[in-house]
Amino acid sequence: MGIPEKTQRVSNTPQTVEKALDIVEAFVHAEGSLGITELSNKLKMNKSTVYRILQVLLGRDYVHQDNKTNKYYLGYKILTIGGALLGQIQLREVAKTHLEELVAETAQTVRLAILDQEEVVYIDHVEGRDPISIRLQIGSRGPVYCTAAGKSILAFLEEKERNNILARCAFEALTSKTIIKVKNLKAHLRQIKKNGYSFCDEEYAKGVRAVGAPVFDREMKVIGSIVVVAPSFRMKHNEVRTFGKKVKETGLAISRKMGCPVTK
């Protein structure tokens, strides 16, 4: 099978990244292992450049090298990435009905999110039936430290992973209510873990409140969160516990379908 034509280059993308991706894609479409000379000829790339990139890919387990032929082939790290993508697809499929049911119960917009570095990415949503509900887009992002989706995930991560993420966060007071001191945020996250749900009280955007809960996989690791988002006047403080209970129950229902052995 031949190497497909290269996609159009993005002018501001570093050339080394483009070349590394070209090499990975060459392996994807190859029928077997490839040597430096083969890659150089197929991609019209300098041999020394091919070698340097392969050494990086080798060190990160994206490719392996055959000790007998000295040729290279894709490593199992690629499967990890593919598995993560399949997991996201599965999560969306499993969660969809539950998102719709939660919208029916609350009339507000419901979102499904996953963690990506120091942000959450919203991979699905169902718009609320309330005429004044929040309108949002799939694929949008938010800071992990001041969104209900992000805090729901942070609170249930292993401490080391949580601390690593917080150490990389560029804390910014997006509103007067944003928690930007790590010590205060950690105390807040402990309370979230105790409650089983998070509450974002206009910390990300003025006039918007949200309640979120984690979603777990079969290994009881947090893999995402489900969130109800509403204008502040549609989610009053005395209603947060009710919203929290509904979101928590929905998160647990999705978790069970993802194989998590949770009961409450």
Image: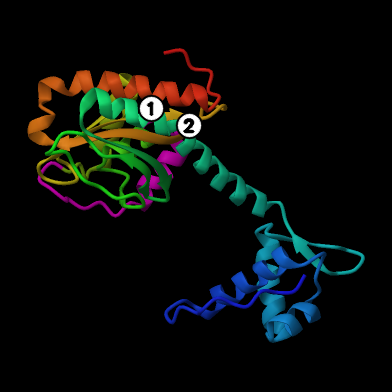
- Residue 73's quadrant in the figure? bottom right
Residue range of the region highlighted in magenta in the rendering: 155-177
Q: Which residue is mark 1?
A: 98
Q: Callout 2: 10 Å neighbours few (<14), some, many (20+)?
A: some
Q: Going by the picture, which residue comes out furthest to the left?
A: 233
Amino acid found under the numbered disc labelled 1: His
Which residue is more in the foreground, 87 or 213?
87
Does residue 221 show up magenta in the picture? no
Q: Which residue is mark 2?
A: 94
Q: Residue at x 29, y 55 (%)?
A: 170
Does residue 170 show up magenta in the picture? yes
Q: Is residue 239 left or right of residue 50?
A: left
Using the image, determine if residue 29 lies above or below residue 124.
below
Q: Quadrant of the C terminus?
A: top left
The answer to whether the residues at label 2 and label 1 have Cβ atoms under 8 Å apart is yes
Q: Callout 1: 10 Å neighbours few (<14), some, many (20+)?
A: some
Q: Residue at x 90, y 68 (%)?
A: 69
Which residue is more in the foreground, 161 or 247?
247
Specify whether residue 187 is in view: no
- Residue 176's quadrant in the figure? top left
Using the image, determine if residue 91 lies above or below residue 165.
above
Q: Is residue 35 left or right of residue 200?
A: right
Q: Residue at x 53, y 18 (%)?
A: 261
Where residue 175 sits: x, y (%)? 12, 48
Where residue 219 sits: x, y (%)? 57, 27
